């Protein structure tokens, strides 16, 4: 007979399990790999930086192999990892490998954000942590910040944000916040949303027929963000966002996967942004026959390779 200590309050497998006694068990994304100076396969270097000592908010920075003049400045990618707001980190093999490979192909500098995760740190803490990192990045725009890689190698007029799943949701919300509170010295040119985690009142696509998954993700959101106002929360519903028209970037690419049970959210986002009056360039990239974040779990898949090539090109468009 099982102990009362084993009683489960919420089971969000394969992400996380929350027990009635308060214990939390993360079921994935726990492994970490160290940063590397000049990876032998890619030439990409990485290092970890603590940005807010009081909270532990940090980032893994990536620098491609420099083959040109040291005076030439590179575009900056701000990457925000997914994982339902509750698992994974920039230091996991999954995200370290993916961001490093994107840096290698695009020849950009990257800052991969390590925000505090729910449910111990409920949303909107992850949004505030990510904003603190953006403010820290902006402090380098005068070439006098605390991090030499940013001072010496970044073109602050070519800054893009990207994320997948929950990270794409956070990236969008950072672009909205930058509209409301511009960051002096940073010019955001691109926003890349891969299989983004959004809800909408009238779901479309596979979500309609996959009620169990929809119910599970709705409950996940409410547990991770207990202060949410529900379906009209602009953090999760793009139609409730009042600032889409002025979104702080020139280009947005929305990537979706046909077999992703959450495809309704990013499709609704694309449609809503299209109708908002925003005057930038909007692209929808759909991969047939693939599921949620397939590119992370099968990076050699020809569609994953094609997506990475497209995103690398996106990062290098002025």
Image (tube, rainbow, N blue to C red):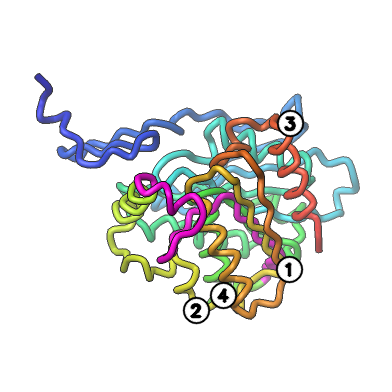
> Would you say 274 lies left or right of 126 here?
right
| Residue indicated by mark 3 | 38
Which of the two labelled residues, at mark 4 and mark 3, occupies the earlier sequence position? 3
Kindly check if marks 4 and 2 are in contact, taking CB atoms under 8 A apart as contact. Answer: yes
Measured Cα–Cα span from mark 1 to mark 4? 13 Å
| Residue indicated by mark 1 | 281
Front position in the image: 259 or 187: 259
- Which element carries disc 2, helix, strand or loop? loop
Whether residue 85 is visible to the viewer of this picture, yes or no, is yes
Q: From the top left corner, tell me how far across and down residue 219 is, in percent.
A: 31, 51
- Queried whether the magenta region covers residue 105, the answer comes back as no
Which range of residues does the magenta coloring cover? 185-213
Residue shown at the point (69%, 31%) measured from the top left = 301
Q: From the top left corner, tell me how far across and down residue 94 is, in percent.
A: 57, 33
How crowded pointer 1 is (Cα within 10 Å; few <14, some 14-19, many 20+) is rated as few
| Residue indicated by mark 2 | 242
- Which element carries disc 3, helix, strand or loop? loop
- Which element carries disc 1, helix, strand or loop? strand
Camera-nearest label, 4 or 3:
4
| Residue indicated by mark 4 | 244
Q: Decide: is 98 above or below 316.
A: above
């Amino acid at each position: 007979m099982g102990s009362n200590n084993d009683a489960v309050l919420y089971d969000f497998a394969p992400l996380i399990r929350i027990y009635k006694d308060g214990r939390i068990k993360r079921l994935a994304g726990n492994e970490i790999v160290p940063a590397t100076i000049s990876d032998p396969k890619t030439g990409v270097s990485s290092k970890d930086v603590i940005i807010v000592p009081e909270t532990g908010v940090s980032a893994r920075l990536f620098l491609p192999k420099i083959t040109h003049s040291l005076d030439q400045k590179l575009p900056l990618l701000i990457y925000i990892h997914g994982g339902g707001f509750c698992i994974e980190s920039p230091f996991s093999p999954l995200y370290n490998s993916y961001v490093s490979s994107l840096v290698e192909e695009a020849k950009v500098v990257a800052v991969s954000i390590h925000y505090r995760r729910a449910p111990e740190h409920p949303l909107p803490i992850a949004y505030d942590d990510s904003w603190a990192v953006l403010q820290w990045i902006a402090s380098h725009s005068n070439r006098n910040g605390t991090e030499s890689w940013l001072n010496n190698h970044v073109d602050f007029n070519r800054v893009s944000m990207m994320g997948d799943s929950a990270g794409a949701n956070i990236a969008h919300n950072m672009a909205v916040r930058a509209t409301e509170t511009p960051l002096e010295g940073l010019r955001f040119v691109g926003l890349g949303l891969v299989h983004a985690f959004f809800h909408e009142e009238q779901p479309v696509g596979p979500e309609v027929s996959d009620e169990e998954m929809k119910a599970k993700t709705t409950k996940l959101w409410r547990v991770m963000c207990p202060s949410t106002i529900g379906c009209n929360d602009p953090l999760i519903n793009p139609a409730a966002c009042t600032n889409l028209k002025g979104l702080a970037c020139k280009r947005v690419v929305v990537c979706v996967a046909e077999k992703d049970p959450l495809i309704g959210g990013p499709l609704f986002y694309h449609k809503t942004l299209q109708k908002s009056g925003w005057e930038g360039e909007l692209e929808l990239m759909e991969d047939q026959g693939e599921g949620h974040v397939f590119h992370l779990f099968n990076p050699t898949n020809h569609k994953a390779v094609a997506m990475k090539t497209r995103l690398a090109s996106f990062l290098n468009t002025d």
